[in-house]
Amino acid sequence: MPKSPAAPVPASSIAEFELSLDELEQLVTRMEGGDLSLDDSLKSFERGIGLYRQCQTALEQAELRVRLLLDPEAPDTAEPFDSRID
């Protein structure tokens, strides 16, 4: 029995990914500035790890959706689309 197509990702999931990525970039910039105390640096690092994991999960879900769209019958063997013209 074929699997049903993946449900569309809600706009809020995309917005959450973009907000998480933005916040992560801002944290990195502040930490690279070197003006944070050790305690603030550790808190920022901990927050950054959480944001990184959220972004990674969102990207993995997006990859799964793409695989399901490419080959709904066997997403694990789906070949990426090559848009180059030979």
Image (spheres, grey):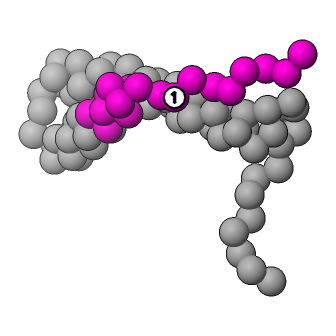
Label 1 crowd (10 A; few <14 / some 14-19 / many >=20): few
Residue at image position (86%, 30%) is 73
Q: As drawn, is 45 to the left or to the right of 74?
A: left
Residue 24 at what x, y percent from top left?
29, 36
Please state which amino acid type lies under the numbered disc 1.
Pro
**Where 25 sits versus 7, above or below?**
below
Q: Secondary structure at mark 1?
A: loop
Residue at image position (82%, 50%) is 79
Q: Which image quadrant is residue 42 in?
A: top left
The C terminus appears in which quarter of the rendering? bottom right
Per the rendered image, the range of residues in magenta is 1-20
Residue 85 at what x, y percent from top left?
74, 80
**Where 20 sits versus 70, above or below?**
above
Label 1 sits on residue: 8
Closer to us: 64 or 9: 9
Q: As drawn, is 40 to the left or to the right of 49?
A: left
Residue at image position (88%, 39%) is 77
Residue 25 at what x, y percent from top left?
27, 43
Is 5 part of what is drawn in magenta?
yes
* Residue 45 in view in this figure: no
